[in-house]
Amino acid sequence: MYSVGVSRSFVAQHYLTVPDPGPEGTLHSHHYTVEATFLGPRLDEFGYLVDIDDVNAAIDDLVERYRDETLNDLPAFEGLNPSVEHFARIFGDRLCESLEPEAATDLRVAMREDDVARVVHERTL
């Protein structure tokens, strides 16, 4: 099994919308680190699992979409509590819309919120 991962860090804001969120219910910032890892059992005809340049470009575009934004205000979070769990899935959704890796069979999106929490969302491609 091969794996190729790319990571970036950025700051975004949110406020939780669950009952009794405590201080997390007011607008605040988090330092996020996201790592997208593609996995697969074989390489393509060029010896790649994914084209790292394409992954870097897609990750950079996504990070710019979320950098310094309030997650609650974005359409992807409409009706959702903007938890890091939802964020990891949404980030993966958008990444899959941007890329079509032929050899990769799975995607793992790990998202760290500050130095406190780490969430992983995995999917089959």
Image (spheres, rainbow, N blue to C red):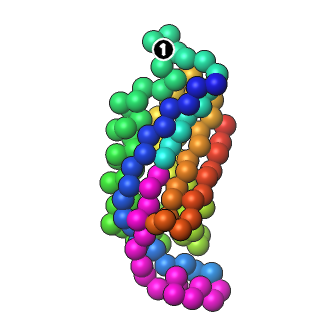
- Name the residue rendered at 48%, 26% in the picture: 50
Report the residue that reaches farthest toward the top. Answer: 45
Q: Nearer the viewer, residue 121 or 77?
A: 121
In the rendered image, residue 22, in percent from the top left (x then y), is placed at: 57, 88
User: Which three-letter amino acid code belongs to the residue tagged 1?
Assistant: Gly
Q: Nearer the viewer, residue 58 or 11?
A: 11
Q: Relative to residue 119, is residue 95 depicted above or below?
A: above
Residue occupied by mark 1: 47
- Name the residue rendered at 55%, 47% in the picture: 109
Q: Relative to residue 15, is residue 87 depicted above or below?
A: above
- Name the residue rendered at 52%, 82% in the picture: 24
Res 115 seen here = yes
Give SS at disc 1.
loop
Residue 1, quarter of the rendered image: top right
Residue 11, quarter of the rendered image: bottom left
Q: How many marks?
A: 1
Magenta-drawn segment: 19-34
Residue 21, quarter of the rendered image: bottom right
In the rendered image, residue 97, in percent from the top left (x then y), is placed at: 49, 41
In the rendered image, residue 36, in percent from the top left (x then y), is placed at: 50, 43
In the rendered image, residue 85, in percent from the top left (x then y), is placed at: 60, 61
Q: Nearer the viewer, residue 40 or 17?
A: 40
Report the residue that reaches farthest toward the front. Answer: 115
Q: Is residue 123 magenta?
A: no
- Name the residue rendered at 59%, 43% in the picture: 108
Left/right placement of residue 94 relative to residue 11 reads right
